[in-house]
Structures are given as structure tokens and as C-alpha cells.
Image (spheres, grey):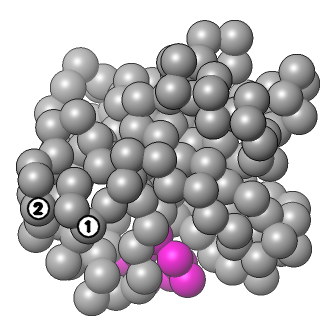
Amino acid sequence: MTKILLLSDSHSYIDDRILEYARQADEIWHCGDFGSFEIIEQLEKINPVKGVYGNIDNAKIRSEFPEVNRFICENLEVLMIHIGGYPGKYTPLAKKEISEKAPKLFISGHSHILKAMFDSKNNLLHLNPGACGKQGWHKVRTMMRFVVEGEEIKDLEIIELGPK
């Protein structure tokens, strides 16, 4: 059993509530637009960080994180892309990656719109945790947490961090 905290679009902002949730997780997954390397350093002091770079991330962040991250957590295959779209509206890169080998979990960020949708065509779960930072047009800062057990996703929670 692996407890995951799923973040995106921090845009150089982190607070004590996010860090407290990070301490409760086994792994922190960040779907891009970290905004600054200091965010990564703060999170890595707490738990391992997996992620992708976002469109606002600088060369240093891009040297540490890929554009596309495909990995296994327990027995669950995960695909993460910052700008990935969502079922029925995937970006060209996401379509290519999913058609080559569909994961069980596809995660994207960028839109600042929290979504949890099942894609029946590709037999996968799509998650977008929204935005945990204060930059952007969203009104409420959000993130997600869940448990991976084998190849199952359990106990998915949406966490509202309050207004930006």
C-alpha cells in the first residue's frame, strides 16, 4: 500500500497545509508548473517526488523532470504529462502515449480544473488535481490524495485548500 499526494500548478507557492499532507504520504507526485526549484527541495525533504515539468518551469527543473513520465507504482502503470487534456480531448502527445500503451492511470495538470474521469475507450482513470498554487484563474486551490494497492486506486480524496 502506497499513499500518494497528487499536486499540480504550485507556481512557486507552497504552504504548511500542503506540507502537512505531504508528510502523511509515502510519495508526492507533481504534475508540473512547480514554478521554482525551492518547491521541489521542500517536498523532497519530506518524501520522494515524482513528476513532470510544466510550461512555466525553467531549465533546471526541466533537467530534473521529464516532459512525459511513465512509471510503475506497486503494480499500477502511471502516465503523467503536464499538458495532456482529458478523455475525449487529449492533446496530440497524450493521444500518442496512450495509443502506444494505455496506462491504468493518466495524470495531467495545466488546466487548473480538478477532474477525475474514467476513460472507457482506453480503460484508464484520468486525474487532474487542479492547482495548489495561487497563480491562475481558479478560485479554490485543490489537490488529491489516494492509495495505490497492487494495481488498484483506493480512497481517492479531493482536498480543497481554500481560496487562492
Residue toward you, 160 or 117: 117
Furthest residue to the front?
100
Residue name at image x 58 percent, y 69 percent: 4
Q: Residue at x 78, y 40 (%)?
A: 102
Q: Secondary structure at mark 1?
A: helix
Label 2 environment density (alpha carbons within 10 Å; few <14, some 14–19, many ≥20): few
Identify the residue position indicated by label 2 in the image: 60
Please say if 136 is above or below 53.
above
Left or right placement of residue 46 versus residue 134 in this view: right
Name the image quarter holding residue 135: top left
Which part of the image, by quadrant, shows the C terminus?
top left
Q: Are marks 2 and 1 in contact (CB under 8 Å)?
A: yes
- Numbered circle sitting on residue 64: 1
Tell me which residue sits at (51%, 27%) in the image: 93
Q: Is residue 144 above or below residue 26?
A: above
Task: Please report the bounds of the magenta region as a residue range.
Answer: 20-28
Quick check: can you spot residue 25? yes
